[in-house]
Amino acid sequence: MDKNFLQAENDQLQALVEEISLEYFGLPFVHRAIFNNRLRTTGGRYMLKSHNIEINPKQLQHFGIAEVIGIIKHELCHYHLHLQGKGYQHRDPEFKELLEKVGAPRYCQVIPGTLNKKQMIHVYQCTNCELVFERKRRIKLQKYVCGRCRGKLKKI
């Protein structure tokens, strides 16, 4: 993509975040908001050290501006509560109350075609004793052997 095009999109996002912050929170957003193409399984994130907000552009492409506005509200809840020294984490009651007050979603929609790594399970079987192994991470079959009989493993 053209650098000027991305800058124009980031400028529009910055203006939108500033507008939403004033309208729903009554407080200014004085940091940067940008689109981050590297985000995969999350709609956006609030950066604790820099106080910037990053938004996944795929959410805009798949679900439209209404979903992005919800994500911005969610990230602004983190932003304003953190700067005020209140509970800004998902588990904190202040965060949950503010989400409800501004009408922000707790979670974003899942983008079609993206697979959360937690859902992926790799199944292996010993060729000798036929013991079945389930693993979240893929393993190198040349490097590992069965823990019971030291036989070779195969992926099922």
Image: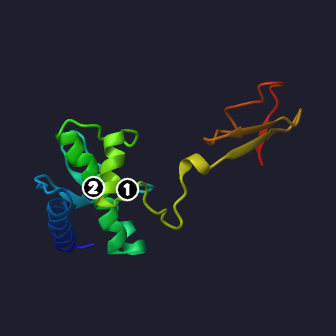
Q: Is residue 124 above or below residue 58?
A: above
In the image, taking residue 33 as reference, residue 144 lies left or right, namely right
Q: How far apart in space, not on screen, are marks 2 and 1 (Cα)?
A: 9 Å
Mark 1 surroundings: few (<14), some (14-19) or many (≥20) residues within 10 A: some
Q: Is residue 143 above or below residue 68?
A: above
How is the model colour-coded? rainbow
Question: Percent x, y for residue 152?
Answer: 79, 34
Question: Percent x, y for residue 8?
Answer: 17, 72
In the image, taking residue 136 as reference, residue 45 lies left or right, namely left
Dot 2 amino acid type: Glu
In the image, taking residue 29 as reference, residue 156 lies left or right, namely right
Mark 2 vs 1: CB contact within 8 A? yes
Residue at disc 1, secondary structure:
loop
Dot 1 amino acid type: Leu
Across the whole image, how many numbered discs are drawn on residues? 2
Question: Percent x, y for residue 12?
Answer: 18, 71
Badge 2 or badge 1: first in the primary sequence: 1
Residue 39's tag is 1
Mark 2 surroundings: few (<14), some (14-19) or many (≥20) residues within 10 A: many
Residue 54's tag is 2
Residue at 19%, 68% (x, y): give it.
16
Query: Of 98 and 113, which appears nearest the observer?
Result: 98
Query: Of 6 and 62, which appears nearest the observer?
Result: 62
In the picture, residue 148 is in which quadrant?
Answer: top right
